[in-house]
Amino acid sequence: MIVRLVLGAALAAAPPLWVGRFSGEGAPPPPWRVVRLDKDVAATLYRRTRIDGVDAVEARADSAMALLARPLAVDLAASPVLCWRWRVDAPVAQADMRRRSGDDYAARVYVTFDMPDGALGLAARLRIALGRRLFGSAVPDAALNYVWDNRNPVGTRRRSAYTDRVEMIVAETGSGRAGQWVAERADVAADFARAFGNRSGRPIQLAIAADTDNTNGRARSAFADLHFVARGERCAA
């Protein structure tokens, strides 16, 4: 009976949902695309490469900001945990997540959400509409932003310096593990519920970025092996 139960549980476990596997060299392939939020700011440069034996996308920012994004369709009830690996040469020294002038990170991983009108108050809908007029359709209803920060402890959470529709979550901090690959996992469903009061939301986009336009700095980072797994399942990479 025990053997049957264990085998049944193994068969029932959903396989990883891969959303970011990279190989070869050159520009990231579709459905990934570069999204510039401000056409007056230089764009972060992205390319596929291999770093320390890991196939990845490298991001280089020199007073620059642009997302590398792709559409996302995932059932968070079945696979709520996002796994990934990332690497930075160093955190952005002058960053300060409390201020727009310091809102820069050597590495970010975004998950953006669509929310029904009933889950948004009038004030929120007006702010979102204004943001889309200024910055285009890339402005989401809501987003989680996992960052490699320079100073705040892992687990720090605060609203973006730009909008209360984005929850910033420090997944890694400081230079202690710079220069090496670091594996991460985040319960996206639980983080969304905590950030937005258990309102309903549908994930629609995944993005990665290196971002230095506010501090006029430089950053180099890399991302690999992005995938979703069930809660309680190990990451595949």
Image: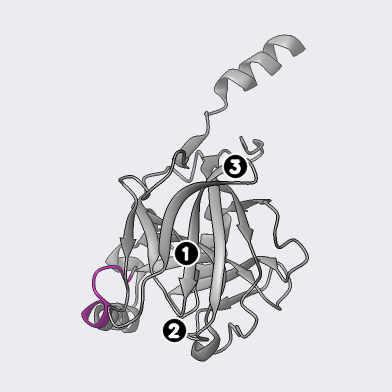
Q: Give the colour scheme shown.
A: one colour
Where is residue 77? Give x, y as percent. Answer: 49, 43
Q: Nearer the viewer, residue 137 or 67?
A: 67
Residue count near mark 1 (Cα–Cα under 10 Å), binned few <14, some 14–19, many ≥20 = many
The residue that label 1 is drawn on is 209
Q: How many marks?
A: 3
What residue sits 61% from the left and 77% below the top?
Answer: 92
Q: Earlier in the sequence, mark 1 or mark 3?
A: 3
Residue 217 appears in view: yes
Q: Earlier in the sequence, mark 2 or mark 1?
A: 2
Badge 3 element: strand
Q: Which residues are magenta?
A: 132-139
Residue count near mark 2 (Cα–Cα under 10 Å), binned few <14, some 14–19, many ≥20 = few
Quarter of the picture holding the C terminus: top right
Q: Label 1 to label 3, Cα distance in Å? A: 18 Å
Quarter of the picture holding the N terminus: top right
Where is residue 219? Give x, y as percent. Answer: 55, 71
Vertical side of 202 occupied by 89: above or below: below
Residue count near mark 3 (Cα–Cα under 10 Å), binned few <14, some 14–19, many ≥20 = some
Where is residue 123? Give x, y as percent. Answer: 33, 84
What residue sits 58% from the left and 48% below the top?
Answer: 84
The residue that label 3 is drawn on is 54
Q: Nearer the viewer, residue 1 or 98?
A: 98
What residue sits 55% from the left and 56% below the top?
Answer: 222
Residue 162, disc: 2
Q: Label 2 to label 3, Cα distance in Å? A: 34 Å
Observer-side mark, 1 or 3, equals 3
Mark 3: which amino acid?
Val
Where is residue 2? Give x, y as percent. Answer: 76, 13
Mark 1: which amino acid?
Ala
